[in-house]
Amino acid sequence: MNWIADRPLVVSFEVTDSCTCYCKHCDHGGPRDDSANLRPKDYRRYMEALRPCVVQVSGGEPLMRDDLTEIVQAIHCGGGLPYIILVSNWSLMTPERYLELRAAGIDHFSVSLDFPDDRHDGFRGFPGLYSHLEGLIPELAKLGHDDIVLNSCLTRENVREIGAIADKAREWGVNLCYSAYSARRTGCRDYTLRSDDDLAMLNGGLDRVEARRDCSNWIVNSTTTLDATRRYFERGGLPGCKAGQRFLVVTCNGMLQPCSMQFERYRLEDREKMIEEFTRRNQCDECYVSIRSYLDKSFPRLLWENVGGFFSLK
Ligand SMILES: C[S@@+](CC[C@H](N)C(=O)[O-])C[C@H]1O[C@@H](n2cnc3c(N)ncnc32)[C@H](O)[C@@H]1O
Ligand code: SF4
Ligand code: SF4
């Protein structure tokens, strides 16, 4: 229904601009002015107007919000949908908070991991982060909820670690999703895969990952998504983005943005204006981040890959 009614399938709520980290590939980092942030009860209005199938709760670093549980409860509102994903660096995660957020309605914990060792600390500007994750993630995975997914943004720095990151996901007993670096966030091309050597590393690494798929779906990206990720890096971009229409961002102060890297802002009431002014004219091909990659497909393919399994169609 959302597809037909031109409502977004996925909404990303960026609940704060502040962050605990200072990542090399990101335009966030450190504290920001949080005085105009939406309060938990404000999120209901957005949910009632947008009615998304999937919600990402992101940031900045969402765990910096002491009222995150109340925000999730307001988004969840006791129903089956939306499917709610918490996208976080987990620097502030604890076992108590994990259980509380699950009870509030988080279905899927996406945990950023850029390296399978303490090079992660250097890339994220957060000493001790890797050892915190190494202690916590296997312990929480053992609870058996099968809701933790490592999220690894592929850059020139870590393209040689594709297999080792997959090994780490297996060792810790969690799932894995790859996403693609975009220079659009910071303007820095140092982390873009450019040379033939980089692309050979990417293709070899992803080929070996493809060979490790099994019926448990622990590699969360579909093969079509990983194939499009290869094309994105090979061509230096991928056209056809539907930001603002199939997905959108709600900033921490309640404005709509087409995506996290396009800063045209609209009021909630002006969503159709955003589609007319931005989406219909959008020529940007500069990222292939997860939120885009999952929705960059025809309606039949989207149904096949995401709904077919529930009806034993595949
Ligand atoms: C912006 S962060 C927000 C949530 C949280 N702070 C975290 O790092 O998971 C969401 C995801 O964006 C990724 N990201 C940051 N900069 C990026 C870039 N330039 N291109 C693609 N993904 C990027 C991060 O690695 C992270 O997985
Ligand atoms: S990627 Fe996430 S953790 Fe790193 S600076 Fe950006 S918002 Fe913070
Ligand atoms: S390709 Fe789409 S989602 Fe990516 S930065 Fe451009 S407009 Fe945003």
Image: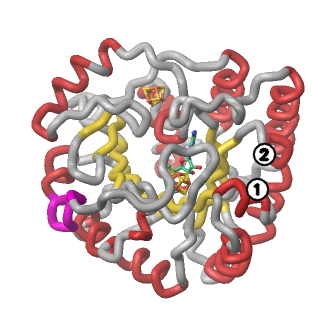
Give the CA separation, mark 1 to mark 2: 7 Å
Range covered by the magenta-colored residues: 36-44
Asked whether residue 104 is drawn in magenta, I would say no
The numbered dot on residue 115 is 1
**Dot 2 crowding, Cα within 10 Å, few <14, some 14–19, many 20+:** many
The numbered dot on residue 39 is none
In this figure, what is the number of numbered marks?
Answer: 2
Residue 172 in percent (x, y) is at 74, 71
Q: Are marks 1 and 2 in contact (CB under 8 Å)?
A: yes
Residue 70 lies in quadrant: bottom left
Q: Nearer the viewer, residue 306 or 98?
A: 98
Residue at 74% across, 62% down: 169
Q: Which residue is mark 2?
A: 158
Q: Residue furthest bottom?
A: 96
Point out the image quarter for the N terminus.
Answer: top left
Name the amino acid, label 1.
Phe
Residue at 62% across, 80% down: 140
Q: Earlier in the sequence, mark 1 or mark 2?
A: 1
Q: Residue furthest left?
A: 269
Residue 191 in percent (x, y) is at 70, 35
Residue at 80% across, 64% down: 117
Point out the image quarter for the C terminus.
Answer: top right
Residue 313 shows in the view? yes
Residue at 48% across, 60% down: 30
Q: Nearer the viewer, residue 73 or 186?
A: 186
Residue 153 lies in quadrant: top right
Residue 186 in percent (x, y) is at 54, 36
Residue 244 lies in quadrant: top left
Name the amino acid, label 2.
Asn
Asked which secondary structure carries label 1, the reply is loop
Residue 83 shows in the view? no
Rendered view: 301 above or below 38: above
